[in-house]
């Protein structure tokens, strides 16, 4: 992967194809642009694919590149469509794909917090 730039459309196509074949209905790719702290992970979902409840690793946002996802925490649920950026709730939350979708997760981990994005990219 080029440490300067990445074609997100090509990556999205790849992740959607992988998610469609994966029993968990998701696929992830860590994006390495040589940052020391900033973590970026692209996650593709087939319809119904999800990231089950997990804790936020620090300050984080998601951008839906394709499709539509549902972001839920203990107090609210919002549907996020392609072209939208949303703040990840601080605390336990989950993500579910309402249709084939790709999101870009950008996080700045805080000391002492688990890095779920890295763990998810290894499991997916």
Image (cartoon, rainbow, N blue to C red):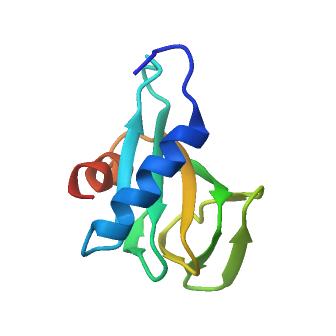
The image quadrant of residue 76 is: bottom right
Q: Residue at 41% of width from left, 65% of height from top?
A: 55
The image quadrant of residue 90 is: bottom right
Q: Residue at 37% of width from left, 64% of height from top?
A: 19
Q: In terms of depth relative to the viewer, which is nearer, 50 or 54? A: 50
The quarter in which the N terminus is drawn is top left
Give the vertical position of 14 relative to 30 (above or below).
Answer: below
Q: In terms of depth relative to the viewer, which is nearer, 73 or 1? A: 1
Along the horizontal axis of the image, is 56 left or right of 62?
left
Q: Residue at 37% of width from left, 69% of height from top?
A: 20
Q: Is residue 57 visible?
A: no
Q: In terms of depth relative to the viewer, which is nearer, 110 or 116? A: 116
Q: In terms of depth relative to the viewer, which is nearer, 42 or 74? A: 42
The quarter in which the C terminus is drawn is bottom left
Q: Residue at 49% of width from left, 41% of height from top?
A: 11
Give the vertical position of 50 relative to 7 (above or below).
Answer: below
Q: Is residue 121 visible?
A: yes
Along the horizontal axis of the image, is 72 left or right of 40?
right
Q: Position of residue 81 (x, y in %)?
A: 73, 68
Q: Position of residue 119 (x, y in %)?
A: 26, 52
């Amino acid at each position: 992967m080029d440490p300067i730039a990445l074609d997100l459309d090509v990556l999205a196509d790849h992740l959607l194809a992988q998610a469609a074949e994966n029993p968990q209905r998701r696929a992830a790719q860590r994006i390495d642009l040589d940052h020391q702290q900033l973590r970026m992970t692209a996650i593709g979902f087939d319809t119904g694919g999800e990231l089950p409840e997990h804790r936020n690793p620090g300050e984080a946002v998601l951008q839906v590149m394709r499709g539509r996802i549902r972001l839920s925490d203990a107090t609210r649920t919002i549907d996020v469509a392609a072209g939208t950026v949303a703040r990840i709730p601080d605390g336990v939350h989950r993500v579910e794909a309402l249709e084939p979708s790709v999101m870009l997760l950008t996080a700045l981990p805080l000391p002492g917090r688990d890095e779920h994005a890295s763990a998810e990219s290894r499991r997916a």
